Image (tube, grey):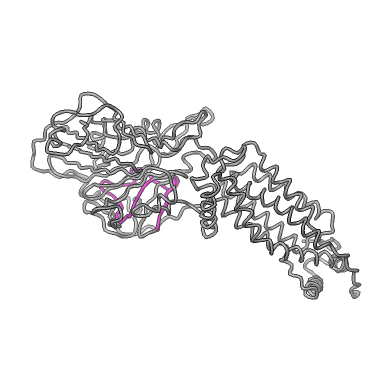
Amino acid sequence: MNAPGQKDKFTPELRILVASLLSFGVIILWARFFGPKPQIPPTQTNRPAQTAPATPGPATSPAANPSQPAAASATIAPAKQVNVAAKNDSQERTIIVENNLYRVEISNRGAVVKSWQLKGYMDDAKPQRVLDVVHPEASQQTGDWPFAVVLDDEQLQNAANGGLYRAWVSEPGPAAETHGQDYSILPANPIKAPSGLDFVWSDGHLEVTKHFQFDHTYVVRVETSAKFNGNPIKAGLGWLGGFGDLTVTNPAPVETVTTYYSEGGKIANFPHKKLDGLDKWGPGLWQGGKDFVGIEDRYFTAAFLPPIIGRGDAVPVPMGTLETRYWKASRTVKVNGQDTLEPVPQVAAATQPLALRVYVGPKDYDDLKKMNPPLHGLINFGWLEFIAEPLFHGLKWLHTYIPNWGWAIVVLTLVINMLLFPLRISSYKTTLKMQRVAPEIKAIQEKYKKYSMRDPRKAEMNKEVMAIYSREGINPVGGCFQMFLQMPVWFGLNTALRYAIEMRHATWLWVLDLSAKDPYYILPVLMGVSMYLVSKMTPMTATDPQQQAMMKIMPITMAGIFMISPISSGLAVYILTSSVVGIAQQWYLNRTHPVPAPAKPVRGKKS
């Protein structure tokens, strides 16, 4: 509120500009420290699937009915004793399977995965290493590993995941059935895909078998069965012990990892803050009706998919047939020299019989869209998806002709600025008109400066100002419209660049990763300087020195935001290029549309 006699220093267009930049800063800081909260499906009263195969329906929180009795499948019902031969290996072995995309290490202790390296991607360690999406330290602390069997009885589960399995490479013909009974038959490591790999273990009561089928893609087919005293029992397959790139920073790796499921075509995500401990899941408690389930970080995912029934990958898969559990364990990490508990998100999937396809690889839009069912919905384009996704596809199209992503962003910026140039001309003409009538506006403000904002006579000032705008055909917002149009593009493009795996470790000149901020702060500085030059060349409607000083500080503020926030370097390249183009366009406008002489102030009526 202005006190009586205090000058109103903020013109309408300056208020709009300041509000826009403040909104930009608030949204960036909010996204940095709080982040968008994932949508959590509402708790329903229906009971999750237990022993029978799940039927599609709303998800149920495991904590919805904590006092409900355990499912019947939790206790192994007395059954007729069946003599089951003990089957195990005499020593622990590591089997390596690889193709051009990955290298997988499987231990015969539990028949679990100990390493899953994606050959086409490096981590952020120094020096860089081939990315491994398995977290060995977390798995060793929790005792859980990817592709572990998940059973309703904890003792049986521990036994199944700790036994020494006999392993052999699947071979066609009747001899394949006797390999598991005879002894481990394995070729020398590594086994080259395509190949099948079988595991069997039994302690005389519990018997577990696993069959892996590797091919030339990121998809692995897994079939699992479990029997107790010869009777089939329900089993699931889990990705346990953590997932993703452990070397990322800002935010920490665990903050980027979520479990998810798809139901009815909608994907629900669960970061660790929304996950309960395993104790919240009663024995035999599973959620049914899922299309696919999995775990992901910003750029990679492990997705459990239903099997394809029939020949060919184009055959429609049965939807809503998977069941899932998702929970968090914990491990101890050092933070500032002190032991701190860190959550470890975990997920399991089940179907009857337990036959799954598992995609372990990058969240590449084109590859995920080709999956059956399509998985491209896992790529997070944020709340401005309608802007971010077209920009992303436009950038990919340009990249087919321009091999470097940074230069593709530069060309995209040129195209967008050429499309917006008519708006710049319109905005410039509006600015010239407002500058011409600025003395009149100032005279009116001087006339009413002695009145407070609550004084009814202050409204007369606004009426007189708007009358001048109407007389001259001025839209007060016209000078800022181009900036309003650019801001959604900034937000959308930043989301596309930060979450598109194509930008991960994409280089441009000195920038080593266009998805992360410039570690040398060169781009923010150049961006701030170029924005300052544009503001100096653009005619200003503000005549007050404080307003002019504020306009000069705004480019510095923008540069500071890019230095302290995890905004992608790709967006800085876009804004820098846009500012350089703006300098050229403004020079042209200043030459072709010179600033007119200001109008003489009209004396208002004495109040």
Q: Nearer the viewer, residue 79 or 323?
A: 323
Picture residue at 22% right of the left edge, 32% below the top = 167
Say if the magenta span includes residue 288: yes
Q: Is residue 204 above or below residue 574?
A: above
Picture residue at 29% right of the left edge, 40% below the top = 214
Name which quarter of the figure residue 430 lies in: bottom right
Q: Nearer the viewer, residue 2 or 374?
A: 374
Counting every numbered tag in the picture gives 0
Horizontal side of residue 340 vs 544, given as left or right? left
- Quadrant of the rendering where the N terminus is positioned: bottom right
Residue 511 in picture, x, y percent from top left: 60, 39
Name which quarter of the figure residue 21 lies in: bottom right
- Quadrant of the rendering where the C terminus is positioned: bottom right
Residue 183 in picture, x, y percent from top left: 16, 28
Horizontal side of residue 308 vs 371, given as left or right? left
Residue range of the region highlighted in magenta in the rendering: 266-294
Q: Nearer the viewer, residue 120 or 11?
A: 120
Say if the magenta span includes residue 195: no
Horizontal side of residue 7 vs 367, given as left or right? right
